[in-house]
Amino acid sequence: MAQNLPIGELLVRRGVVSRAEVEEAARGEGSRLCSRLLDAGACDEGDLVAALAARLGMPGVDLSRSAIDLAILELVPRAVAEADLVLPLSGEGDRIHLAVDSVQRAEQALTELRFVTGREVSVYVAVLSALQAAIAGAYDARERNEGLWRGARAGPGLAGFEPIMPGSPDGGPPIPGGDEPFADLPEIEIVQAAEGEVVHSVQVEPGPPRILVVDDEPAIRLLAQRALQGKGYVVDGAADGAEALDKVRGSPPDLLLLDAMLPKVHGFDVARQLRSDPRTRSVPIIIMTAVYRGWRFAQDARDSYGAEDYLEKPFRIDDLVRRVEVVLEATATRDDARQAALAAPFIARGRELLAAEKPAEAAAALDEALKADPFSAEAHFQLGRALRARGDAFRAMTALERAVDLRPNLFPALRALASLYLEKGFRNKAAGSLERAIQAAPDGATREATKAELLKLL
């Protein structure tokens, strides 16, 4: 398999370079093999990216043939781009398309970017030296008030980039995608008011509101606890994300004061996991951070993670107390069951319109459903179906991702998401969705058919 081969061996097998050229480049100091080969002029950047894409199971980008609308750079400060080696490419489909040299290195930046913008992120592997040069060139051009950056081999015309698909491990034709590569799997629909959509209620004893303060800095926890206890609240603390999840799931508080940067489980992931669980999705969350000052904060960032408010550090104690009071008052009468009931007719209408092959009208109905109940997994799933049917693949991907965030075992959404990932070249992500779908399959025959599709990708 391509993933198991050293990149030099893969390049030789693909005929991109000779073994002698790889051995000579490997003797160099600094940088990485692909960067050395590119800088030496031994091969084309696109061929290197194709090999990297096959090895990593994700699409790649030839930056020399790309053009970037520099307005997208507003989403990532230059210092962050240079430190984390990430470069925004476009905002197609209301997602952020990002060039990276390493998914692992960029993981923290990806999580933060999702929060700051409220948008999902798709990543494309690039050759390290090309990425570093493109970051410098693009941000320099933006500082000169230019509107567009072009790679050295980019053609004329508007901004854009062409993803390089991973292809098959042996360098042959790409793994077939098509509109529905898993068409042999049985079609399974979910029904309204399925078990995962039931809104759970928690019986609580009357008394002062209970607040959980989560921060890895003991001084911050103690400061917040003392201030809130002084106002009559019952306050508990947690030092990391894993402890916070355990405490909230064990006994949901009336409010969660959550630091964004936490050990073990990132604060944003804590918020996402709590919103995906019907038992905890109603817990109000205030996110605290000292990291994102000066970034462009979008209002829908809070919506993406379900946070009611956002508090920058350092904060004033009176401001903290005031925000806690406001959020508790605003959420005291929140009724998730009523939200679900209001969304139900729009979901039913969306399904009818999809059956009648009217995806645009179906998407409009399902948008209304999500206005009524933003945490309805079924509404997000049906919206994903509608968007894909009308050819809006990346927005469909976002809707399906949201559906499985909210209901992790939603088999039809996992299967549809795997199909979309494969179509767009995210082979490893497609495999990951199929692995999850195997566990969520409703019966043995479907489980075996899903396993068979997964084996084709491995």
Image: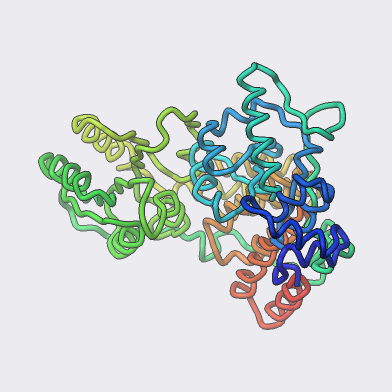
Q: Nearer the viewer, residue 253 or 115?
A: 115
Total residue callouts: 0
Q: Tell which residue pokes out farthest to the top in this image.
A: 145
Q: Where residue 35 sits: x, y (%)?
A: 71, 49
Report whether 216 appears left or right of 441: left
Question: Residue shown at 17%/42% (left/top)?
Answer: 223
Position of residue 85 relative to residue 15, above or below, is above
Position of residue 262 relative to residue 138, above or below, is below
Res. 175 visible in picture:
no
Which quadrant of the figure contains the N terminus? bottom right
Which quadrant of the figure contains the C terminus? bottom right
Type of colouring: rainbow
Q: Where residue 162 sits: x, y (%)?
A: 81, 43
Report whether 337 appears left or right of 426: left
Q: Nearer the viewer, residue 132 or 20?
A: 20
Q: Tell which residue pokes out farthest to the bottom in this image.
A: 444
Report whether 424 appears left or right of 438: right
Image-quadrant location for residue 58: bottom right
Question: Residue shown at 63%/24% (left/top)?
Answer: 140
Question: Residue shown at 22%/44% (left/top)?
Answer: 220
Question: Residue shown at 54%/46% (left/top)?
Answer: 110
Q: Where residue 66 sits: x, y (%)?
A: 78, 36
Q: Where residue 96 sits: x, y (%)?
A: 63, 40
Q: Nearer the viewer, residue 164 or 34?
A: 34
Res. 105 visible in picture:
yes
